[in-house]
Amino acid sequence: MKKILVTGAAGFIGSNFVHYWADKYPDDQLLVLDALTYAGNKHNLDDLLASQAIEFVKGSITDEALIESLLRDHGLDTIVHFAAESHVDRSITGPDAFIDTNIVGTYTLLKAAKKIWLDELGVQDNHFHHVSTDEVYGTLSADDPAFSETTPYAPNSPYAASKAASDHLVRAYHHTYGLRVTTSNCSNNYGPFHFPEKLIPLCLLNILAGKPLPIYGDGQQIRDWLYVDDHSLGIDLIINKGRPGETYNIGGNNEWANIDVVRLLCKLVDEQFQADSSLATRFPDSPCAKATPASELITFVADRPGHDTRYAIDAEKITGELGYEPAEVFESGLAKTVAWYLNNEAWWRAIQDGSYQD
């Protein structure tokens, strides 16, 4: 039985991972930590909290005394570290929070883990898993090979630079102190509980409200899209089968241009309105309620500074070593995502009106 601290557990990817792990490994102890900043939503975990499948602690990963006490008092042997500031646009306008959370926060966790696990308690079977991003590798041209674990780091935004720094700290704590660490660098995630500032949920909710769908530049920026449950599967394999000190790239084998992502999303929402007449009543401002294609809302806007052209993940290492294969193709995962948002209107309405943190 593992005793796991999950950081950033009320965020998008963290909360999906907690649901995944609690369902697959019900005998494990899950202590979940989140500072509940703007993108942290405790309601993402309501069902697990109600069933007492997890224990929740509100707190920051920069609080060293708190982290030490949690590791010591709960006998934890594993950390799965999701907590991060992650929105590139916010890192451009306000990078300070990214430095504090992503670099200082990760350092604080590592320092506490070393002190409690190695120096104080001698926990031999410790494991610190660090969740990172493909953005640390920079950008690719159309003909470049996909990012591998040996691709040199070349971060282009304050967000990417802060994650690159945290990756190096994790590696250093393994090689210098012997902390058992693994790192995963993932491609763009999508799925349930995705905070509405990101491309897919933003455009989906704008379709329902009849608002423009803003597309940066010409929309030809390419991303590899990973359904969030497939990300959890990859982390599961790394935790249980990965080699200490190693990095594994987790990808979805789904390279799509942003404009094509939005066009597919529009098509799926059009189909939902055609199949379910009640949606027109629920969302009367949507063009779909008037049998007008959602794609008419697409609006091209000025590109953001330093916008990377293409990200793509080479997942050969995790596939070959650990047997990883994503379960979803993009069309199936996006259809699941659209259905989840339509079935969970109260969740995203609470975010829109600010009551989700009550």
Image (cartoon, rainbow, N blue to C red):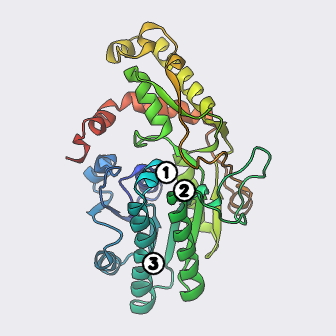
Mark 1 to mark 3: distance in Å?
25 Å
Mark 2 to mark 3: distance in Å?
24 Å
The answer to whether mark 2 and mark 3 are in CB contact below 8 A is no
Residue indicated by mark 3 = 110
Observer-side mark, 1 or 3, equals 1
Q: Is residue 204 above or below residue 243?
A: above
Given residues 226 and 294, the one toward you in this image is: 294
Q: Is residue 260 above or below residue 101?
A: above
Question: Type of residue at label 1?
Answer: Val
Residue at image coords 65%, 65%: 153
Mark 1 to mark 2: distance in Å?
7 Å
Q: Element under label 1? A: helix
Residue 318: x %, y % from top left? 68, 60
Residue 275: x %, y % from top left? 48, 13
**In the figure, residue 65 lies in which quadrant?**
bottom left
Q: Which quadrant: the N terminus?
A: bottom left
Residue at image coords 40%, 43%: 195
Q: Element under label 2? A: loop
Residue at image coords 42%, 57%: 85
Q: Element under label 3? A: helix
Q: Residues within 10 Å of mark 3 (few under 14, many from 20)?
A: many
Residue 28 in sight in this render: no
In primary-sequence order, the first of circles 1 and 3 is 1
Residue at image coords 29%, 56%: 36
Question: Type of residue at label 3?
Answer: Leu
Question: Type of residue at label 2?
Answer: Ser
Residue indicated by mark 2 = 157
Residue 256 in sight in this render: yes
The tag on residue 88 is 1
Residue 243: x %, y % from top left? 64, 73
